[in-house]
Amino acid sequence: MEKEITIYDIASALSISPTTVSRGLNNHPAVKKDTRQKILAAASRMGYRSNAFASNLRRQRTHTIGVIVPQLNSSFQSSVMAGMEKVANDAGYNLIISQSLENVQKEIANAKTMFDNRVDGLLVSLAYDTENTDHFTPFFHKGIPLLFYDRVPENRNCTSIVIDNIQAAYKATSHLLAQGCQHLVHISGNLKINVYKDRLKGFKYALLDHNIPFSDSMVIPTDLSEEAGIAAAQQLLTMHPVPDGLFVANDNCAVSCMKTLKQAGIAIPGNMAVVGFNNDPITRVIEPNLTSVDYPGYEMGEVAVRSLINYLDGASDVTITNTITLRSELVVRESSQRKTHV
């Protein structure tokens, strides 16, 4: 294995001081232009690599931002990552991305790895089963900025970036009611997670404003997987009456549910109008195309990284603003536009 070339090797080769080499490599104005060119040429010829890690440690900055996501094979999270990468790259930061795989123990391990790698800041969307967030306490103690996005803790004194899930769900449910639906069901995720808890609240508020009594039988809690969508569809078929309106807390679950219902002879939207959430690409593939809440993932990623970098650069204090709320909108497609009321 070849020896790593240092500034001392370059200094020896050029018969100048290591300080001059260091200054030349960093474009210091005290070093004459021709000397600087000789230093750069020698560094290139000898295979010198700058030790950014050591340099960053001296400055107490690594120019890396850690990101912990629940899972990467998600259209929404991919969109968020794209927004994060754009802003980070433009600002000269690198992202270290890890996934919890929807498991709190993996999330705890990821957080420790990020801390040990001295990230300048951390962005987190919580795992499906995370209820206690004490594993992020070391970041607060060290003054390392921490922002949560999408799935956020409710009782942490830190910045969160979300959409108004209550309002989004209210609009989705009100749309179904405006289509003449009378017997609605909401397929939800883990109700201990902020996004799913708030979507249920929006569902309930819409029913209340339309004088439709709520009952627990109108909610089917699931893990929102494709398999859960199939099981939920089978449960819907046993209800009396069979629901005529369905609001599902994500698109993948909604699509698998629709496919199962169609196979059982349920006409969509004629017998049952369906609305999903996230506006994933799959909404434009399923027939009929799925009405869904458009969740601005790319913008959320941009805002998250920009907020963090502004804090790191001293332009803002992320501890001042507890919540940043982004806009969302209901994209109406054929799955919820009922031609006849039943």
Image (cartoon, grey):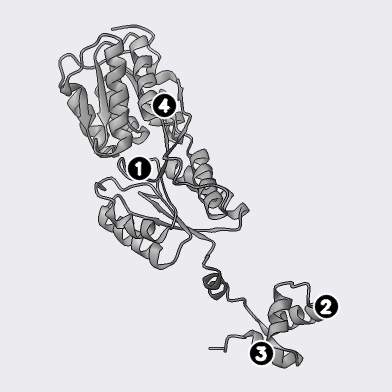
Vertical position of residue 239 compared to residue 81: above or below: above
Disc number placed over residue 4 in the picture, else none: none
| Mark 2 lies on residue | 32
- Disc 4 designates what residue? 292
Could you tell me which residue is drawn at 62 percent across and 76 percent down?
Answer: 50
Query: Is disc 4 surrounded by few (<14), some (14 to 19) or many (20+) residues within 10 Å?
Result: many
Helix, strand or loop for disc 3: helix
Tell me whether circle 3 and circle 2 mark residues in contact (CB < 8 Å).
no
**Disc 4, disc 1: CB below 8 Å?**
no
Horizontal and vertical percent for residue 303? 52, 42
Q: Position of residue 28 (x, y in %)?
A: 74, 73
For badge 2, the amino acid type reads Lys
User: In the rendering, at what x and y percent does residue 101 appear?
Assistant: 32, 52
**Of label 3 and label 2, which has the lower sequence position?**
3
Mark 3, residues whose alpha carbon is within 10 Å: few (<14), some, or many (≥20)? some
Gap in Å between the C-alphas at discs 4 and 1?
A: 22 Å
Q: Earlier in the sequence, mark 4 or mark 1?
A: 1
Say which residue appears at 57% left-offset and 72% top-offset: 52
Q: Amino acid at mark 3?
A: Asp
Tell which circle, 1 or 3, labels the residue nearer the N-terminal end: 3
Q: Nearer the viewer, mark 4 or mark 1?
A: 1
User: Is residue 82 among what the camera can see?
Assistant: no
- Amino acid type indicated by mark 4: Ser
The disc placed on residue 152 is: 1
The mark closer to the camera, 2 or 4, is 2
Dot 1: element:
loop
Where is mark 3, residue-wise? Answer: 9
